[in-house]
Image (cartoon, helix red, strand yellow):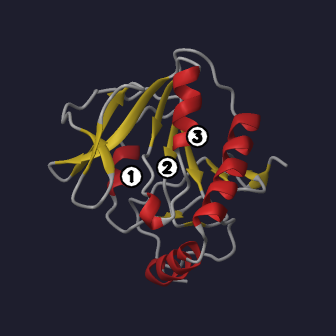
Amino acid sequence: MKKSDLREKYLKKRESFSKEQVLSLSEKIFRNFTDNFKLSENQKVHCFLSIPEKGEVDTQLFLNEFFKRDIRVFVPKIYRKKLISVEITAETPLLKNSWGISEPESNEDSGERDFDYVLTPLLYCDQQGNRVGYGKGYYDGFFETVNAETLKIGLSFFGPDEEIDDLRENDIPLDYLVTPTEVLSFLGAASKSTK
């Protein structure tokens, strides 16, 4: 399927969830993440701030855990048409931008490129780790700048089902996908489930 069709299909699926369903599924995704990925003090995690109105995976659960464990947290912000990475603490005030996305007030890019994990928003991901986002390409550009050892982890309510027909040369696949029921690895020659 084409990205535009997949985007439309999975947006509709996601919009059909109640707030309670989103929270329940997000908790399962969070548990799968913490069960499968090592978390330790002073790690560096880049984590998107979810948009509740769009029914995205609730990342507040992740942020609370990271702050509790003294993990350094960085969040994305679109500044001058580019995704920058801003470090935040539990006390950093967040403001809503014109897209309804919470973000820190600062426009200062941390310059950090050596993340342990980049938790990535998406609408859909295929069996090779290729993702369908909102179509702006911000994350592909960002992925090009991070250390090669950084694990790119997608958080999604849905597992891979259909192939993406219209991949572009600059599309960068994820390393893992965490869903409510499984964790998939795309590292190596073939995709494999860790459960």
Please name which of the two marks, 1 or 3, marks the residue nearer to the observer.
Answer: 3
- Residue 117 shows in this picture: no
For the point 27% across and 61% down, the residue is 99
Q: From the top left corner, tell me how far across and down residue 47 is, in percent.
A: 46, 40
Nearest the camera: 1 or 9?
9
Q: From the top left corner, tell me how far across and down residue 166 is, in percent.
A: 46, 77
- Residue 115 shows in this picture: yes
Q: Which residue is mark 1?
A: 139
Q: Which mark is residue 61?
A: 3
Asked whether the beta carbons under mark 1 and mark 2 sit within 8 Å of each other, the answer is yes
C-alpha distance separating marks 1 and 3: 22 Å
C-alpha distance separating marks 3 and 2: 15 Å
In the rendered view, tell whether residue 62 sits above or below residue 100.
Answer: above
Q: Which residue is mark 2?
A: 120
Q: From the top left corner, tell me how far across and down residue 163 is, in percent.
A: 62, 75
Nearest the camera: 89 or 171?
89
Q: From the top left corner, tell me how far across and down residue 74 is, in percent.
A: 39, 32
Asked whether the beta carbons under mark 3 and mark 2 sit within 8 Å of each other, the answer is no
